[in-house]
Amino acid sequence: MNRRHLMSGLASSVLMSSFPIGAAEQVSIDSRYERPSKDSDEGSLWGYMDHEEDKLKKSPFLIRDSQFKNYLSSIACKLGGAHCPDIRVYPLMVPFFNANMAPNGMMQIWSGLMLRVDNEAQLAGVLGHEIGHYLARHSIQHLRDAKSRSGLGFVTGLFGAVGAIASLGLAAGGFAYSRENETAADEIGISLLSKAGYDPNEFANVWENLQIEIKASTEGENSGFQQLFSTHPLPKDRQDNLRRIALLSPGSVKNEELWQDNISPYLRIWLKDEVKRNKFESSLALFNRLVQREKNKSEYLFSRGEVYRLRNKGDDFQFAINDYKAAVLAGNEPAEVHKGLGLIYKSKGDKDLAKASFLTFLAKEPQASDSLLIKSYIEELES
């Protein structure tokens, strides 16, 4: 089947229960998969993933808020249709851009991904892509290949033992589909996205935004992204392909405000985790985009200021001061804004401003874990 016929089929699939993704395989979206027999090859892989899912349920990285999990599950169900009862969504506090779905229906969504999407439609695009892998049974074939290479334990660990993952590059290298699989999952995902009423252009926006971070990254920082796309379509190619398919697909729902409201309780810790990655250039590229949002603006300004303060190159201290002050003007700033100001003023030898900033921090956060340290700084400044 050539690409033109494939795209035409996908454009009309919003009205169909199944659609072709290749010459020899058919994907059904209106019937659930039966659990394979335990003594079959596929059944043993499902059993392995069930075991990994049990481990995942005990992970300290798991977000256990039932309301938030139900919200994410509702998005997956809009996309999965009849497969909804078999999709179990697990949001995780992992500051990298990633989501995946196991052949038994276990889906992970990492906080680094949720931080980066601007609205519900963008997340739905990524989830639709993962559900596309599931519907096309790509993960079964991949796990079989891994098993033949004696790599099954490592690959399945990416689903269950998320705490062992040290970097995005490691994750990408361990669970990388072929480019053909990735392109097919993109196309299925766009079809599911459109059928659910979401704006299909938003999925392309995800990759457009990611390119901004990739281009900003230094060579060392970029290594993880390079591994991620060594077997994936490159972001620009992927974005262009998604744009072409989106032109053939209806849908307009974005749900930006609803998305921002639902992530608000977790935003501060996700931003702190991003700062802690110490990937200054890519984080600045991300925060330069996020500060354009009106909701939670002070949080984004503070986070960008933290990156400038920690990088401390050239005029970074002044850039940090500017962001901290802008966060205060935006209102509802994190108390740590004033600690950041105090640290910079202290390093610059401006004792009065440093002391005033530290005192403001302690007034706003008297039970801070580092309050004794800050008090020692104040005593030092007074001496």
Image (tube, grey):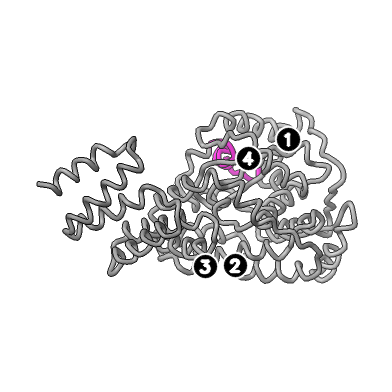
Q: Nearer the viewer, residue 87 or 365?
A: 365
Residue placed under numbered mark 1 in the picture: 41
Secondary structure of the residue carrying tag 2 is helix
Disc 4/disc 1 C-alpha distance (Å) = 35 Å
Report whether residue 173 is seen: no
- Residue lying farthest to the right in this orientation: 16
Q: Is residue 149 above or below residue 297?
A: above
Circles 2 and 4, Cβ within 8 Å, touching? The answer is no
Residue type at mark 3 is Ile
Give yes or no for contact between labels 2 and 3 (Cβ–Cβ under 8 Å).
yes
**Three-letter code for the amino acid on which mark 2 is drawn:** Glu
Q: How far is disc 1 from disc 2 in space, using C-alphas?
A: 39 Å
- Label 1 packing within 10 angstroms: few (<14), some (14-19), many (20+): few
Is residue 157 a member of the stretch shown in magenta? Answer: yes
Read off the magenta span. 143-161
Where disc 3 sits, the SS reads: helix
Q: Which residue is mark 2?
A: 208
Residue underneath mark 3: 212
